[in-house]
Image (cartoon, coloured by chain):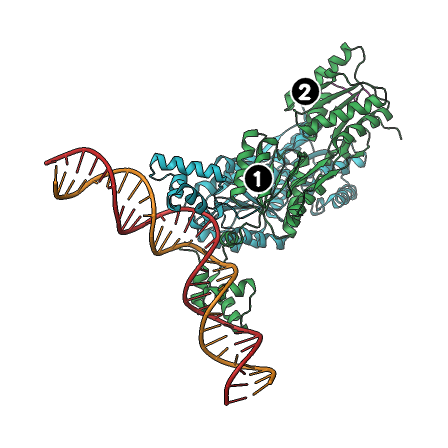
Chain colours: A cyan, B green, C orange, D red
Amino acid sequence: MGRRVTIGDVAAEAGVSTATVSRVINGGTVAEATATRVWEAVTRLEYTPNALTRSIFAGRSSTIGVVIRDLNSPFYLDLMRGIDEVAAANDSLVMFANTFRHVDRDLAQVRAMDEQRVRGLIVTTGEGSDKLTRRMAERGTTCVIVARTVPDPPPGLHSISLNNVEAGRLMATHLAACERSAVGVVSSGGRPSQIERTEGLRRGLADLGLSLPEDAVIAAENDSEVDRAVGALLAAGHARGKPLDAIVCTTGRLTVAAYSALAARGIAIPDDIAFLTMDDFPWAAMLGITVIDQPSYEMGRRAAELVVDTPSDSVELVFEPALVARTSCGEKK
Amino acid sequence: MGRRVTIGDVAAEAGVSTATVSRVINGGTVAEATATRVWEAVTRLEYTPNALTRSIFAGRSSTIGVVIRDLNSPFYLDLMRGIDEVAAANDSLVMFANTFRHVDRDLAQVRAMDEQRVRGLIVTTGEGSDKLTRRMAERGTTCVIVARTVPDPPPGLHSISLNNVEAGRLMATHLAACERSAVGVVSSGGRPSQIERTEGLRRGLADLGLSLPEDAVIAAENDSEVDRAVGALLAAGHARGKPLDAIVCTTGRLTVAAYSALAARGIAIPDDIAFLTMDDFPWAAMLGITVIDQPSYEMGRRAAELVVDTPSDSVELVFEPALVARTSCGEKK
DNA sequence: GGCGATGATGTAACTAGTTTCACGTAACTA
DNA sequence: TAGTTACGTGAAACTAGTTACATCATCGCC
């Protein structure tokens, strides 16, 4: 147990002042013989410098803060890996908090990160913390908002997002190319990204002379809601006199549930109904599921790079989605 | 920009000493009128206390450190979620580092966590950092080793693991119950858990009068190696004059690759070959894949609870695996 | 041999708070 | 009314370091 070894203990052991020890460790001008004595003392006492103290003097820590909505989603997981990769390359650690999709929790988490004086902050949550991230950016803490843009951002407040409208348009053109015309959409809540994707899909279909009725879009949050939504979409198609020939899922988080809901009804993909979803994932290739992929890993990397590089203005990065065509839409060879 | 607001600024604004501000914030005996004045100053100046300074005085921070081998594995991801859940409930943040399966990196990461004076540390990596975690535990930082046990642990050094031998035995008995007798194993490297699972499987089979030849176990690390391993296992089966009727995968990380390798060869599961793997995952139910599940989320929770509760002795928790029977082994109704 | 330049080191002030101790005031008791 | 107690508060010491500044010995140069 006992007290931890401090720089003072090392200084006493080596017969020098704490200033000299500090200089040895951080590379100041020290005589070689002294440096050797100090390093010996460091080793003998197993001294581990206190990074907290160092940070308080530097004004901020070297850790990168990340507030994630939901670690379950493949998008956020890949994002996290990208962030972590860059952090590791820059000798930074990542301080992590999950908000479990609780809106009220994200403000508290962002505040906690601010209290920890993180070097920069990457936030994937909603607008609830916008006022605080603005203030943090103004006070010198780089903040990066992921998966959403912010109006009129101050310097130091950046955003990284996907061209969601284009993602929707890609869906529309691909489905049309696969000769599908009656589309149903499973969406997730009212996040901007979800709305934009649906809007892009609607516009893309309209450009091709196809329509997407209001009741062909249903929001769901969990497995059972998705199952009900799929049922309702199919029923609405029949009621409309034009049975669905395609189901689109606008979030990777609900892919399993949506696909399973179709399978559970004995619906053959793609013969009965085409299936198209967001975000590539390991099993997609195996299952032949066509997806609209976003470069989530790269987005994570860029977010962390913004924190590390601290550009002085405000950067808005928009990534382009990519269609990964496989077989679930009845693709022609 | 400008300097950050300090407790001194708040004190000046409220016309009191820094000691009084500190007491107001942390709950000492303060007159109500003074407290009100201080809180007003805090709000007016948008004061955010510096958690680093607080931690240096407390001797350690309130963050929980986590060093993960590989975020890609479903096991580690669920573990992480369990840890995060408990951390959030205890107003702790999680400091995270991924070692990307680089053995040399994990010592550096553990050291970095020690320098950050984490409240406790959860480590899922190899033996390389054992000496350091022992020392940390002896000096008062609770350490939890996950997915491995440690010989002769000092107080404050805990371990959480799965009964891997039992996991292997469960595989053996289930395969036998499904009338499979020629088993091939895809394993991952030389980690203790992998070896124990294979050993349990071998013993379980032996108890049932079945054998597991040396060349029926092949290690692989990535997708292409898994594909080659599956090919080699099948060939060895034929060479032995007893074609394989079951493939077992001892790590969830390689499930996709192993399953895909079979599918790519046009092998029908379970009609041609039974498939059994570790760790439940979202698509398993959909695909009918039978798995041996470990309570990874619960293990994460318990690990974090050990950090939060700091029992004074050394705790060794061993969790029991559970068979989740579906259809991939040709299960009889 | 005296002079300024250089290099190594210690002293002390600083970071942003927390906490102990001492003091003054006010209320309560004898 | 005097003595005791409790309460609120500030000064100062403390945490674990970093850094500006001063000191001093040594060295090369004229």
The amino acid type, in three-letter code, at marker 2 is: Asp
Q: Secondary structure at mark 2?
A: helix
Q: Is residue B271 magenta?
A: yes
Left or right, B317 with reference to A47: right
Left or right, B120 with reference to A239: left
Magenta segment: B264-273
Residue identifier under label 1: B135
Q: Quadrant of residue A246?
A: top right
Q: B307 or B174: nearer the eye? A: B307
- Image coordinates of residue A37 in percent, x first then y, are 40, 37
Q: Residue at x 54, y 41 (%)?
A: B113
Q: Main secondary structure of the magenta part?
A: loop
Left or right, A34 with reference to A203: left
* Distance between mark 2 and mark 1 Cα atoms: 42 Å
In this rendering, the answer to whether B117 lies above or below B42 is: above
Q: B119 or A40: nearer the eye? A: A40
